[in-house]
Image (spheres, rainbow, N blue to C red):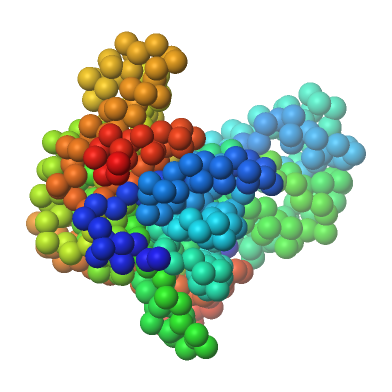
Amino acid sequence: MKLTQAFQEQDFVVTGEVGPPKGATVEEIMEGARVMKDYVTAVNVTDNQSAVMRLGSLAVARLLKEEGIEPVYQMTCRDRNRIMLQSDLLSAEVLDIDNVLIITGDHMAMGDHPQAKPVFDLDSVQLLEAAKGLNEGHDMAGNELETPTDLCLGAVVTPASSYLDLQIMKLEKKIAAGAEFIQTQAVYDPATFEQFMKRVEGFGVPIMAGIVPVKSAGMAKYMNANVAGVRVPDEIIKRMADTPKAERKQVATEITAEFIREIKDMCEGAHIMPQGWDDMIPEVVKQAGLAS
Amino acid sequence: MLLWAMHFRWSRLQRSSIPWMEVIATTMIISESKPLEEVLEMLAGYDSVFVVGCGECATECQTGGEYEVNEIGKMLTEAGKTVTGSLVPDVTCQVLDTGRLLRKSKEAVSRADVILVIACGGGAQAVAASVDKPVVSGVDTLFLGDTVRHGQFYEWCSACGSCVLHEYGGICPVTRCPKGQVHGPCGGTTDEGKCEVNSENDCVWVLIWERLDEIGANKDAVASAAHEPRDYSVHQRPASRIFEPRRTK
């Protein structure tokens, strides 16, 4: 099912996320996806996340589909030129994938193969444009396709960026290029998110607030220091620091559910990236009042 | 290589038209010396060496000027090699001039087992084009650099073959963003306006945005502009251009 259809049917759409592992194995992430299945509309599959070489997102997306879990196939511009990007979009279509999230991708300098050639043949706006073209029945060179794709296209934005004007500028270009839904970078402060939502009023595409549950005070501090455009408030850091290790998942669940309750009326959905704490999603969704 | 040659032709033109100007801050081919051990490794098996530097970029980068040619000569001698001679052409990538100079040093060149070139890769190949001897490059050629201050070089142009500077107020996102983002920044702009890939570098989109304010440009036009994907076919390797002389004497 396309996410666009879900937004028509539901007031608030929740998506989860799994990250393919380093290795030719899927048991663990499949189990993670199964745990969240009944509580989310779809599950994103990340594409060599953090520029670390891993199992491919298209293969995992297809495996999810076979289990009746709706995948969102994430695709970065980092590793493929326009021939392969378009080809993979056609592959996604024949593998019955309905949703694709198009992102720039972390630079290889951040990952485990810093020696790799940075491709970035297209940027995310140009890839959205190309994907829209495939949906319309032609490739980037203008050649007609025997059968067009029918993919629902998504994009991302960083709501807590210190340079929000630039983020908004690019977001508008992404929407003009064909983005039909937006999942944001992690955001923690409802007031920051509210300001962002005011800026995107009238943009006409559903926005899903991105949530990365804080697993520990250390993780929060690390993100604040090293992940651009992510700001974990001191209050959350303190709460996690005061929590014994055994109870951290429970507290992280409460914090996440509280955040969703606060932003629920501002936007169209939440995208939860549990970073392996997949089993917290059912409880988050329940505590947020989105399921019983 | 020819593009570089073009550049030198241009810088020479500037120099000839402004004869009193001693230091010309210009775009340079930036190079870096390879570690001595690496150079010696490449020279293993060769007893005698002829050394070639360059009077232009490699001099400016302190990788292959007169001084460095003398220094590496001393080091090679210390390492037990025989240095049969050396040469620092004004502009080593001028293939014909360099060939002519090497022929003038024919005797010393012929006594050498190998030619060590400490100029850019273009210069090294200009030497290889003129001499039937193995050529070893003692430097790594890095990028096309603007001289911001004496000895401080920054990559502002990557010779992409399709200039888009007019669309960005005169600052190039193709070169100055590690991901070449032409529609706006990725999510990696830090709170300080730096690039998350290398925090010493400004996010080029922050620079462009400030620059557009400074020059009073229409930001809305930039903000809504769509940019076609770059056409790599215009820069197929190896590139070449043959120019007809503009006028005869």
Using residue B175 as the reference point, say whether residue B127 is left or right of it: right
Residue B125 visible in the snapshot:
yes
Residue B171 visible from this viewpoint: no
Q: Which quadrant is home to the C terminus of chain B? A: bottom left
In front: B84, or A38?
A38
In this rendering, the count of numbered labels is 0
- Report the front residue among A212 and A2: A2
Please tell me which residue is depicted at 20% across the width and 38% down the height of the picture.
A261
Residue name at image x 12 percent, y 51 percent = A199
- At 13% across and 36% down in the image, what residue appears? A191
Looking at the image, residue A84 lies above or below residue B11: below
Residue A161 horizontal/vertical position (percent): 24, 41
Position of residue B119 in the picture relative to residue B171 (left or right) = right
Q: Nearer the viewer, residue A252 or A157?
A: A252
Residue at horizontal 39 percent and vertical 20 percent from the top: A248
Image-based side of B104 in relation to A210, left or right: right
Front-most of residues A46 and B135: A46
- Horizontal and vertical percent for residue A5? 31, 67
The outermost residue toward the front is A292
Where is residue B191 shown, x and y percent of the image? 26, 34
Residue A279 in the image: state x and y as whole percent.
Answer: 45, 35
> As drawn, is B15 to the left or to the right of A85?
left
Quarter residue A98 falls in: bottom left
Q: Quick one: quadrant of the N terminus of chain B?
A: bottom right
Q: Is B1 drawn above or below residue B205 in the view shown?
A: below
> Could you say which quadrant of the image residue B48 lies in?
top right
